[in-house]
Image (spheres, grey):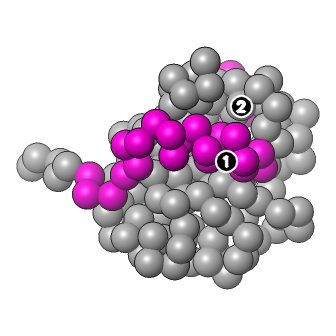
Amino acid sequence: MECPMPTINIHDDAIIKEIFTHYKRIAIIGLSPDPTKDSHKVACYLQEHGYKIYPIYPKEEMILGEKVYRSLSEILEPVDIVDMFRKPEIADTLLEEVLKRGDVKVFWLQLGIINNEACEKAKAHGLLAVQNKCTKIEHKKVMG
């Protein structure tokens, strides 16, 4: 079975740059405590570049020196970007949590993760929706 091309994405580097320039608080869904995992490497990179990260993971108390949350709804501080490192079907449930919060501006599905329906719905609710792109790669590309 061939994977369909994503119909929802932000291909404009200027918009990606605006995201990274204006939005600094990132909840990372599926942030692994394992330093060899991509989610950990990406979160570490973002943290090193001045972003506040909120790890969301089912275990652990601290990852990268930050308190670990079990769900997005547990974070009491504002969140600008939700960056997901989970299976595509999780995006539907995650988006419901995002919409309940009301403060998230960007719904981001990591490289290799595509859920057109969730991204369409996110856009319909006024969010920027990005899928199948890595925040670390995109940041390096647009922010130098």
What segment carries the magenta color? Answer: 6-35
Q: Is residue 8 above or below residue 42?
A: below
Decide: is 33 above or below 18. above
* Closer to the camera in the image, 143 or 50: 143
Q: Nearer the viewer, residue 136 or 63?
A: 136
* Coordinates of residue 69 in the picture (x, y in percent): 80, 56
Tags 2 and 1 touching, CB below 8 Å: yes
Q: Which residue is mark 1?
A: 28
Give, as a three-letter code, the residue at label 1.
Answer: Ile
Which amino acid type is shown beneath numbered disc 2? Answer: Leu
Q: Which residue is mark 2?
A: 46
Q: Position of residue 16 (x, y in %)?
A: 53, 42
**SS class, disc 2:** helix
**Disc 2 crowd, CA 10 A, few/some/many (<14, 14-19, 20+):** many
| Inter-mark Cα distance, 2 to 1 | 10 Å
Q: Earlier in the sequence, mark 2 or mark 1?
A: 1
- Front one among 58 and 107: 107
In this view, the residue in front, 141 or 62, is 141
Judged from this view, the residue extending furthest toward the front is 14
